[in-house]
Image: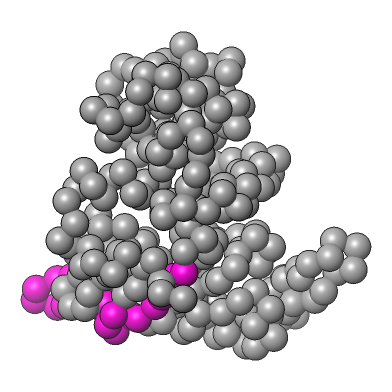
């Protein structure tokens, strides 16, 4: 199957006097309809890779293909209608309501979607994200976790083209979306992503929680020091030593019959 996104020999370097590589010679492919997580220790290059794949940044070397086209050549409005991005941090320095933030996600469709479609999409996403009671509140009055849920809602409002919620060909990029969320909202979000995946959505997530990644991913991209350690299924990853090598700590995985999934934990030295 032809990948919806592929990257060939990506490299990013920073610094002039003392250059340092953030990514080196990274090549990956992502099939349509997959939920892919990107993992690795701090400074591994996860956000750097995500921002190259979604078109927010360009590599110093290498090429990203989006639906078999060079990503750098795609019109920004056309790209905004095909993919949405949740950044790690999204500070809003002005007064604005929760509803207005969510409505910003529909901006790429301003001239093409009907008012009914826009309203239907927003109404459904508000329900998914459990935001009904805070729509008129000022965004700045929310807690960090509440703000994060609003930003996720805005991103979903962009990636959902219309009220039919046919998400074939659409791609969602999320940078650490479970940060700031309590455990109930973490799992609610991951379950929602799987529901949207079933509608055809391709999802690429930077995540630190290895257990969540193993539970919900179809594919895991593992990075360390800007290098690709490999692309794995969850089953492949727990049966090799890649996690221990990536995080420089002995990580053990065990199948839990009651939960019907693998659980991992570091084995601390005593």
Residue at image location 59% in from the left, 15% down from the top: 133
Which of 63/131 is in front? 63
Name the image quarter holding residue 55: bottom left
Give the percent coordinates (x, y) of residue 116.
Answer: 42, 19
Give the percent coordinates (x, y) of residue 251.
Answer: 67, 78
Classify 8 as above or below 65. below
Please state if 34 lies on the left or on the right of 90 as rendered.
right
Look at the image and tell me whether residue 2 can be seen.
yes
Classify 246 as above or below 180. below
Residue 224 belongs to the span the image colors magenta:
no
Which of 16/172 is in front? 172
Residue at image location 78% in from the left, 67% down from the top: 261
Name the image quarter holding residue 129: top right
Please state if 66 lies on the left or on the right of 139 as rendered.
left
Residue at image location 39% in from the left, 66% down from the top: 4
Identify the colour scheme used: one colour
User: Which quarter of the figure is the C terminus placed in?
Assistant: bottom right
Residue at the right extreme of this rendering: 258
Residue at image location 66% in from the left, 42% down from the top: 188
Please state if 23 lies on the left or on the right of 86 as rendered.
left
Look at the image and tell me whether residue 203 can be seen.
no
Q: What stretch is highlighted in magenta?
A: 8-31
Residue 20 belongs to the span the image colors magenta:
yes
Residue at the left extreme of this rendering: 17
Residue at the bottom extreme of this rendering: 240
């Amino acid at each position: 199957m032809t990948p919806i996104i592929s990257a060939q020999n990506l490299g990013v370097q920073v610094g002039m006097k003392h250059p340092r590589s953030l990514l080196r010679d990274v090549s990956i492919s992502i099939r349509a309809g997959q939920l892919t997580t990107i993992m690795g220790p701090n400074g591994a290059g996860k956000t750097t890779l995500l921002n190259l794949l979604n078109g927010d940044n360009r590599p110093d070397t290498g090429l990203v293909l989006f639906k078999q086209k060079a990503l750098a050549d795609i019109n920004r409005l056309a790209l905004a209608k095909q993919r949405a991005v949740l950044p790690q941090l999204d500070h809003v320095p002005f007064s604005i309501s929760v509803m207005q933030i969510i409505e910003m996600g529909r901006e790429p469709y301003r001239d093409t979607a009907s008012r009914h479609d826009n309203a239907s999409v927003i109404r459904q996403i508000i329900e998914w994200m459990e935001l009904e009671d805070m729509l008129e509140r000022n965004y700045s009055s929310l807690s960090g976790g509440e703000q994060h849920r609003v930003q996720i809602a805005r991103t979903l409002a962009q990636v959902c083209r219309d009220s039919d919620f046919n998400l074939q060909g659409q791609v969602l990029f999320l940078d650490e979306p479970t940060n700031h969320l309590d455990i109930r909202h973490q799992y609610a979000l991951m379950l929602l992503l799987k529901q949207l995946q079933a509608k055809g959505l391709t999802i690429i997530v930077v995540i630190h929680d290895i257990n969540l990644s193993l539970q919900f991913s179809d594919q895991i991209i593992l990075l360390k020091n800007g290098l690709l350690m490999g692309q794995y299924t969850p089953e492949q990853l727990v049966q090799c030593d890649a996690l221990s090598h990536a995080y420089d700590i002995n990580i053990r995985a065990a199948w839990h019959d009651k939960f019907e999934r693998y659980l991992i934990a570091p084995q601390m030295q005593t």
